[in-house]
Amino acid sequence: MRKIFAVKQVPQLEWSSASPLNFRPRIKTIFYLNLGLILFGLGESLMITSGAGVSPWTVLAQGIAFNTNWSIGFATMVVSFLILILWIPLSQKPGVGTILNALIIALMIDFSLAWLPYPEDLGWQLAQATLGILIVGIASGIYLTANLGAGPRDGLMTGLQRVTGLPIATVRITMEVTVVTAGWYLGGMVGAGTLLFALGVGPSVALGILLVKKNL
């Protein structure tokens, strides 16, 4: 547990791009990037279909979708591009991975919703939500190490961490709590799974980084 909260940076691994602004990355780098993004979208969809409450950012997307009649995936994509505006004062620079993040995750959410189970038992709902959180964390560890530019949310997270010097887990928890409040106000669905995500995704991302650093 102590190691998880001690993670403060994303490691450079064998497949990592030498620069996040590399616009001609190796095939292996693109593979790990896309693998991470697809899994991330799947994890988000598992949260949505669990019925136990969605992740804070999806609460926001749901709130926006509720007020615009957009799909959750499209609302997620719009939110992603709006977040990039917040990168400006943090001096964060987008890369290939940043744009693919905004596109692939949103498309994966809309695609996978029709194929996942919708449990009715509370125990299974919480189990599916927990699985979604773990998949999101591990997926983050995979795609971040590609080093082709962080996704909008993770770029905001790493930018804030660099400016504040706080652990990644602490920064992420603060972000999630703030976003879920705004999403709930707009009409997004908040439940037990939302609280689990808000408190668990920071440590889950850090765990994902530790796992890929050690085993992949």
Image (cartoon, rainbow, N blue to C red):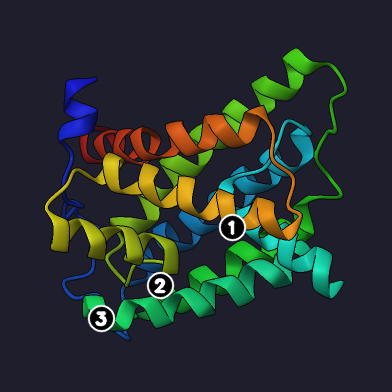
* Image-based side of 37 in relation to 74, left or right: left
Q: Residue 130: where, in percent of width, then height?
A: 58, 27
- Front tag of 2 and 1: 1
* Image-based side of 153 in relation to 73, left or right: left
- Give the labeled residue for mark 2: 97
Residue at point 76%, 55% (across, down): 187
Q: Secondary structure at mark 1?
A: helix
The amino acid type found where label 3 is placed reads: Pro
* Image-based side of 148 in relation to 52, left or right: left
* Image-based side of 104 in relation to 75, left or right: left
Q: Residue 28: where, in percent of width, then height?
A: 35, 63
- Give the labeled residue for mark 3: 89
Pointer 3 and pointer 1: residues touching (CB < 8 Å)? no
Q: Residue 118: where, in percent of width, then height?
A: 85, 33
Q: Residues within 10 Å of mark 2 (few under 14, many from 20)?
A: many
- Of the numbered discs 2 and 1, the one sitting upstream in the chain is 2
Viewer-proximal residue, 106 or 35?
Answer: 106
- Could you tell me how far apart the alpha carbons at marks 2 and 1 are, in whole angstroms? 27 Å
Q: Secondary structure at mark 2?
A: helix
- Give the labeled residue for mark 1: 182
